[in-house]
Image (cartoon, rainbow, N blue to C red):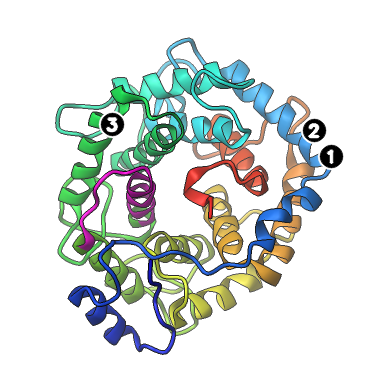
Amino acid sequence: MPTQNSALPRRAFLAAVAAGSLGPKAFGDPLIPHTVETSGVRMMTAETQRCIDRGLRWLSARQNSDGAFGVGRGYGRNVGVVALAGMAFLSSGSTAGRGPFGVEVTRATDFVLKASLPSGFINNTEGQSHGPMYGHGFATLFLAEVYGMSRRRDLREKLERAVRMIVACQNNEGGWRYENVPKEADISVTVCQIMALRAARNSGIFVPKDTVDRCIEYVCGCQNRDGGFRYRLKPRSSSQFARSAAGLVALYSAGVYDDPAITKGLQYLKTRVPRGFFEAHYWYGQYYAVQAMYQAGGDFWESWYPAIRDQLTRDQLPDGSWTDMTFSSEYATAMALVILQLPNNHLPILKR
């Protein structure tokens, strides 16, 4: 598929997208050197693999028979946390029913499917939620990855309904917000939805081109002059690490790979290479930052992954977990494992 031409000003690019002159499909293809894929052999050290193995065993031991994590009301029973844990198991190379963690993937899949409502909304009211569209976005992404790997027939209908829910909840600015209504938008929730849509499209599910085009315009509108991204279009606010990483991945997920917005965003983000301390929304930010650097490749990837790899290796607890004071250890551990295993290149959403 054609990609965005860096010579086009953004308004001209968006006009070309709207006119359909850049191709019939909703998402472009990356033009990333394949050396980033082979770097995993070098970057995935023996120590890193031992760290990952400990984390996967801990996460597996924390999963309940119904696929959830933890006990009682809490983020462990949130569909988003279950989906992220499922992504961690998928990142190891296991798929539903296959591989060392195939049972865990199946349990997580069944839990998410059970939380799928007739409207398409994926939400488990039993679990605590920071905003149900976060959970819906992560859950839809996970289902799309499982479907892309397994082609499970019982998944497709619910995945299609989940995608239609995302499309219906896009607001008039082009983004999404906490609730499953098209009223407000912020960049943090928006990246969850466009990444889910990209994964669904990659697995053969229809995604309207207009939905993607409007999302690109919204995300570009949230970029500040320093290259970072603010939380919402209005009121204007300063750039911050986590939201800037999210903005870049949102653009990559929408098929924008070669544009001044990407260049400026990467320049902003590269000054935030992990240096051994936690920032606000640490796990969320690092989850998206490592994906952005993987997409960028080259020096961005070569400097970022070893830094976050070494930091996570140092921060792992003796039992194999990582901690997070806001949500849960299951959430932090799932995020850490997805980050560390990215060089494996097992997730369809990141395959080239």
Q: Considering depth in this image, is 339 or 72 the residue closer to the camera? A: 339
| Label placed on residue 61 | none
Whole-Å distance between the Cαs marked 3 and 2?
35 Å
What numbered label is drawn on residue 47? 1
How many angstroms separate mark 1 from mark 3 (CA)? 39 Å
Q: Magenta part of the protein: which range?
A: 191-209
User: Considering only order in the chain, which callout, 2 or 3, is on the residue closer to the N terminus?
Assistant: 2
Please state which amino acid type lies under the numbered disc 2.
Arg
Q: Residue at x 37, y 42 (%)?
A: 203
**Residue 81 image point, x, y percent:** 46, 33
Tell me the SS state at disc 2.
Answer: helix
The reply to whether dot 2 and dot 1 touch (C-beta < 8 Å) is yes
- Residue at (67% x, 30% y) in the render: 321
- Quadrant location of the N terminus? bottom left
Using the image, determine if residue 192 lies above or below residue 9.
Answer: above
Q: CA distance from mark 2 to mark 1?
A: 5 Å
The amino acid pointed to by label 1 is: Glu
Residue under pointer 3: 156
With 210 as the anchor, is 65 left or right in this view?
A: right
